[in-house]
Amino acid sequence: MKKRYLILLFCALLMAQHIWGNDDKSGSAVSIAVNIPAQTGLDSRNDISGGDAGQDTHPEEADSDFAGILLSLVIILLAAKIGGDLCERIGQPAVLGELLLGVILGNFYLTGFGGFEQIKHHLSIEVLAEIGVIILLFQVGLETNLQEMKRVGVIAFIVGMLGVILPFFLGWGVAAIFLPEATVYVYIFVGACLTATSVGITARVFQDLGRLQDKEARIVLGAAVIDDVLGLVVLSIVAGIDSAAAHGGGGISGMGIFMIILKAFVFLFGAVIIGGWVAPRLFKIASRMRGSGLLISFSLMFCFVMAYLSKIIGLAPIVGAFSAGLILEEVHFYDFSGKGEHQLEDLLKPIAAFLVPIFFVYMGMRVDMTSFGNTAILGFALALTAVAIIGKQACSLGVIFEKGINKIIIGLGMIPRGEVGLIAASIGAKLKINGIPVIDRDTFSAVVIVVILTTLFTPPVLKYALAKNKSDK
Amino acid sequence: MKKRYLILLFCALLMAQHIWGNDDKSGSAVSIAVNIPAQTGLDSRNDISGGDAGQDTHPEEADSDFAGILLSLVIILLAAKIGGDLCERIGQPAVLGELLLGVILGNFYLTGFGGFEQIKHHLSIEVLAEIGVIILLFQVGLETNLQEMKRVGVIAFIVGMLGVILPFFLGWGVAAIFLPEATVYVYIFVGACLTATSVGITARVFQDLGRLQDKEARIVLGAAVIDDVLGLVVLSIVAGIDSAAAHGGGGISGMGIFMIILKAFVFLFGAVIIGGWVAPRLFKIASRMRGSGLLISFSLMFCFVMAYLSKIIGLAPIVGAFSAGLILEEVHFYDFSGKGEHQLEDLLKPIAAFLVPIFFVYMGMRVDMTSFGNTAILGFALALTAVAIIGKQACSLGVIFEKGINKIIIGLGMIPRGEVGLIAASIGAKLKINGIPVIDRDTFSAVVIVVILTTLFTPPVLKYALAKNKSDK
């Protein structure tokens, strides 16, 4: 049983060592042949004509490491499946295993073997991971009924609001206690770091356990969308403080904030209304086209367009992908069933099986365990983590008058923090007041620890709460 | 009917203009929020601790253009589906439409609108395209029976050999006629450029028309594998001449060539034998694991490992992917059917529908139409194209004693030229003898034209020959 893992691990190490342990790859004629394909293609302009050489910023060396990308994909997929298997055996959601194996791969260099470090340097792997989480939220949207989402709209709104306000002031308070000599800017930034929920993990836990149909899941997903809009507002304020402090003026006005909120809500409602009108017509056209794979291709295009639009508005691409799923859930693809095409959900599964684990393993890989080595800040970090978790429990106040909703699940589902917190922290790190960065290295590490702990804490605890809720009913 | 294309084109242009036509993206608070996510993630080390900053060569700006990548994917998929639809309506294989729409997108800048140019600069799109063609050949391998491949092995070997030797000497001859004052090195390089078949297009035509089961398809696929091995040898010789000319000695010995061939054949036979032993055991293990999407994940891993191995040996990754498909065709996944998983072929279809068109559109995009503007070399280029096509017809001599095989299909299937020709040409372009590059700009352009014409020529002609062959029987 364990022997097979050893064999698999050995193979992975061998391959990693083979390509990465050996820098002297040129020399033999065969190696020349290996490395050459990167330098050209069907496009001759780079090499010879040189007419617009300045325009082409294509990094040459990257494709020559296409072998490295393939190997990275194999290692990531293998880690995902091993992690998922182990976690499911001990009754945990697969996503926890993917994250943990990612943490192991990402910090393996601490053992002295740096072969896995190269995975982090492939930009394409990051892009595949990003596409993976978009596909995940698209899937989740497809499994979520828009009408039922609307029914929990107000509650989700309140839950989302509470989940931003409370962690913000709790974070402020903890910072004020631990960093008494710091300025109010520091407290604002620390508070901002604790606001935004990273819904990918929660969505995946609900999906792993087949509980996306629960009312709690809908509320958390809806609240996470609101949360993302508010996160955008917080980021804009933080960025406004940044420019105000740096340039001694400007900042962001109440009007500016209002416009951001307006834009975001116009997008969200506009997407659902216009998308709901466009989608059936788009798929009607697609169903009349000739060729194969039309349903999946047009669905992906729809999903990517929505993700793109939400990204350029300033929201997370996953918000757009989730909306795309919600909209397409309403569309019935009668026109395609006659052509022998499968259900959209079935078609998405293999793509998700390929790309979604890349996101979670990659997310785990970016966890930097050395953050925990800094014992000086560990107390501050743990206090922040505690209020990050407690703060989100306030979300359950939003459903206090609703019957039949498990408040604990709502609170737990909102816990994971991700990119937005780190973005706020990194803005603070770059912002200097009187020559001192607002977020210094220690505070930044503390925020990183909050992200790590809330990420790893949620899957097992949420799984426990969901299991308990089921048995109670 | 045509109106819908106009609407779709208009939307694509609008989006492209929106993101690319406008360089002044910073300024508002929202734009700041948009651009920030690129700079961080779960990994704090880049931003703050700086401990191993030198190690991380991650290009920051690339991810900030994740929106651009999403939009590029939408444009590519839309172009693929429109091109495929139009071509199928006029009775042509979909792949021709994907290539042609790619050519239009890639040369649209000539009209003055440069919005599509950005697509070429996303390395991730190139990686997705490369994964796409790997998936295609994996699929083709899965649809091909290994035993039947073995039965045509000797014929395929002869066909592959002939398809390298004849075009080489014909290319030499044409170069000698058109470039009488040039050295023998030039003739060798031009000959080398005409040797290798780019099997992706032929495989796709057979697949589009549902004719992968034809004996002709097997022979062409087998010959293309042999061809790739010989292409490796040609490249090594060319590289050997390169180093001999540049450093006044060395070059490549007969022993060196023998070793390359040996390595390649050991890999190919080793892959089939060892892979055939490993695969059932690997999938037996996988079938006992818990989690979802195990069949597709482990199949992709197997495919990627084989593609990786063939790449590091010096062969094209698609050769490994094809071998992986051949091996798994033999494995029967009884263990998975009990878990309600679909057939592997069905699982691969949506992934292929997403990624394969990216390859062909991208390939079309890299076609540089300005090559045709050089009328001075057009005669040379057309003569080279003619012998490139005629030379591969010699392949049909390999099946002269076989009954029931359409010789024309064999010859036509071997026509497409791709990367290997351009690689040989680009080595020649870098190699200078007495200060003059062996392959000058004009000769390089001529080779590019050969690649373009053979690529676009094959699908319609092969389709015609296949249709005729069916009606004759």
Image (spheres, coloured by chain):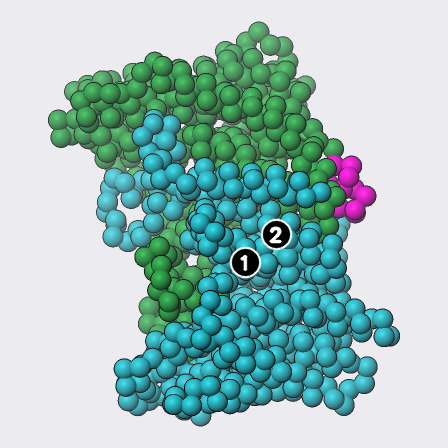
Chain colours: A cyan, B green
Residue B318, compared with residue B4, is above or below; it is above
Q: Quadrant of residue A138?
A: bottom right
Left/right placement of residue A343 relative to residue A193 reads right
Residue A328, compared with residue A343, is above or below; it is below
- The residue wearing badge 1 is A103
Q: Which residues are magenta?
A: B333-344
Q: Within the magenta stretch, is there residue B338?
A: yes
Q: Amino acid at mark 1?
A: Val
Q: Within the magenta stretch, is there residue A370?
A: no
Chain to which the residue tagged by mark 1 belongs: A
> Which residue is pictured at 28% across the width and 89% down the height?
A248
- Of residue A405 and residue A82, the one placed in the foreground of this image is A82
Q: Which mark is residue B454?
A: none
- The residue wearing badge 2 is A80
Task: Name the secondary structure under disc 1.
Answer: helix
Q: Amino acid at mark 2?
A: Ala
